[in-house]
Every structure is written in C-alpha cells, then in structure tokens.
Amino acid sequence: MSADTIGIGMIGLGTVGGGVAKLLREQADLYAKRTGKRIELRRVLVRDVAKAKASGLVDPAIVTDDPEQIISADDIDVVVEVAGGVEPMSSLLTFALEHGKHVVTANKSMLAEKGPELFATARQNGVAIGFEASCGGGIPCVTALTCGLMANRIDSLFGILNGTCNYILTEMTSAGKSYAQALCEAQEAGFAEADPRLDVSGADAAQKLAVLASLAFGVKIAGSDVPTIGVDTLDLKDIGFGEELGYDVKLLAIAERWPGEKWVNVAVQPCFIKKDELLAQVGGSYNALSVHGHAVGHTLYYGRGAGALPTASAVVSDLLGIVSGWLPAAFANLHLTPDLTAAAPLLDRADTESAYYLRMETLDEPGVMAKVTTILGNKGISLSAVLQHESKAGEVVSLVVKTHMTRLGDVEAAAREIAKLAPIRGEPVIIRVIEMPA
C-alpha cells in the first residue's frame, strides 16, 4: 500500500460493478488528489468472460475467470467484491485476506452469515474489510455507527432498509393499489427482482439489520436471529384503518436495547408509525435509518438504498478509506466488529412491549364488543382507541382496537381466545404500532 499506484481486483461486473468501474475511470484525478495515490482497476473476475468483454464497462484485457489472478496476484492490493452470495464469495475473500489483501464488499448476505469469521481472518492478517455498501446502498450507515456516533450508547435503530418493499408500500398507501399490483409495477420499474421473495419476505432487511445491530450494540447477531414478517402479509383494509387512526405503514428493521435490561430486541415487520414522523415520509424506493443515541438523541440517514451509482459510491468511498489509511487503522484499533464480541442476549419475541393494532372480523351482533374487551382486560390489556364503521345487524364488520403499551405474548394469547368466539370470522390481525423515542 506504499506504492504511488494501488492495484484493484474486482469480483463481479453487474450493476454495481459497472458503477464502480465508471467512478474509478471518470473520477481518477479527483481520487488521486484526495488520497495522494492513483487507483488502478487491474483485473475483473467474472463467470462469463465473453459477455463482460463485450459490455464496454472495462478494458477487455483485464477481464478474467481465474480467481488466482486476483486473490493471490502480487499486483493486486485491494479486492472489491460486488458479485453477491455467500459462497463461493466467502471462500474467495478468505483466501484474499490470507494473502494480505484488503477487501471491500457490498455483500450483506455473506456478512450476516460469515462476518465474524471474515473479520477475524482480516485481523489475523493485518488487513481490513470495508463494508459500507452492504447496508443502505449509498447511505453512510456503517460510518455513522462506527465513527460519527462513537461517543454514544446506541439505544435503538429503526430502518427502512429495503427499497423494493418501501416502493410497494408507498403505492399501496398513496394510491390504494393491491399488493399484487404494486409488486408487478415494482418489477416493471426494475425495483424488484423477477423472484422477489428475499425482499418481500423481509429476509433482505433482516440481513442488513444483523450487520448494523451488531455494530450498534457491540454484540454478535446473525441474519437468522432476526424474526421477520414480510409485506406480502398486508391487507389494504388494515392500511386504510391505520390511516384513519393517523398512521402510515412501513416495513421496519428494528433493533432496541431493552430499557433497564441486558436484552436486545431485533425484528423486521410491517409497523404502523405516526404520519408526522420523518420515517413515515420516506417514500418510493428510498431507504432511511433512524439511530437514537443516549447523548445525541435522534439522528436520521436518508438516501437511495440501491442502484449502480449510489451503491458504487459506498464501495469506492471504502476503497478510498483503505487507500488513505484511515479505514485500516480504525479496523485494527476499534473493537466493534462481531469477531470481538459475544452473541447477543436476544429478547424473547413474546416479551416485546409496544402498542398494538388488532383487527377482528365479526358478525355485528349484541355483546361482541363486551366479550372482546373482557378477554383483553383479563390479559391486562387496556385500549387507547376503538374503530368500527357503521353496519347493519347480522353483517360481517371489521372491529379495530389499538392497545396501550403491552406485551406481544399477551396480545397473541388474547387474539387466540377471541378467534374462538362464535361471531368472529378468521384470525385477528396484529400489527405493531411504533412510538418513536423522543
């Protein structure tokens, strides 16, 4: 890394890889001025060499399908990985780290599963891993947590971390479109993959949350530790009732340090949030992360969470951090990454305390409300709002209640009892109502 020119080997030449190549080519003089060194893309590893050479994104002479030309080559100082997937990327990057090469990656799936092992390998070999692009695209979430907010005990994260889901929910709430219609339009617009399950199930956001929450709380959290409920479970009826109560709905990635306890609570799920909250106003394919620190209070990071240049911006920023020397120094000296921390003491999902929205479909007949409120009262659940539209006797009508702060396990137990009442049709719907920290 002492040479005047730094050699880069890149794995992948898709949307993000093309963006990285474009920035390195078009902003070469700016980056040299900022770091004092020239940055040269010397090799690009791809599966389909002919396709990559014909793409026009890079010099065809530097395209290869031989990993050894990157992971062990003497003229490669930093390996940039923008291909995705857990394997073979985890193995390839392990070899690169063992050969003394710094790594920059946008791979949240790999970090959520293999992060501790990769970080430990980097530390053992005196090199660093930059991973800003793995969470939130071009938004500097990782830098904020590891540098800008170092003086704070982080108490909570509330994130909109999947642009596909946020686009779908924006269309459902603002235009009254069905989930199926909004998903179809998201696919046509290029915001959603042909197979959208990783996004709409909440799994993508869970992987990103695992990476961010590990840094924020100084614990080890895997993507599989995060309970998820996707946007594909939402009904337009609930979105409408939520709006009447003054709420918008967002797929939130949530990490909370439980007040007065050692526990950490993590989840990804659709939640109601007051319309005047800043997070509620994040629309379309944009992402945002709300971070609450004990000293600074509320901070918000907002921007494009995906796309060629926004994600490439984060990749190249990490690359410049490595070339300039600050990122390896921070990696070596700050005890933040999950290879140095213990597994998180995770709160039992049933013990999550919050306000909750509960919708029941019931025959409109005398005594139903009394039976429902008796069951809720027996579980120690008090109500802050009740909503029911006018109907005719004998019709099936929606009965909506919003609780005060209460335990999820008690709400779910009450819902099971309510479902057994003769007038009730189907299972009650439960949605968490978020009250943002002050």
Image: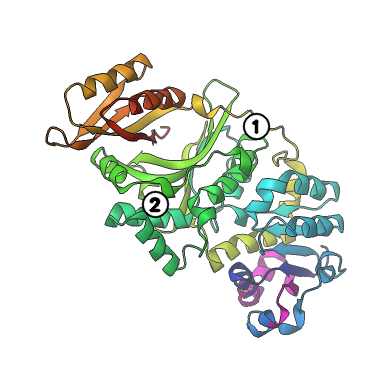
Does residue 326 appear anywhere in the picture? Answer: no
User: Which residue is more in the foreground, 270 or 146?
Assistant: 270
Q: Name the residue: 61% across, 49% down.
A: 143
Which-is-in-front pick, marks 2 and 1? 1
Q: Earlier in the sequence, mark 2 or mark 1?
A: 2
Q: Are marks 2 and 1 in contact (CB under 8 Å)?
A: no
Q: Along the horizontal axis of the image, is 312 left or right of 94? A: left
> Helix, strand or loop at disc 1?
loop
Any mark on residue 344, and which? Answer: 1
Q: Position of residue 276 (x, y in %)?
A: 31, 42
- Residue 344, x across and y down, in percent: 65, 32
Disc 2 from disc 1: Cα separation: 30 Å
Quadrant assignment for the N terminus: bottom right
Q: Amino acid at mark 2?
A: Val
User: Is 420 situated left or right of 29 in this image?
Assistant: left
Disc 2 target residue? 282
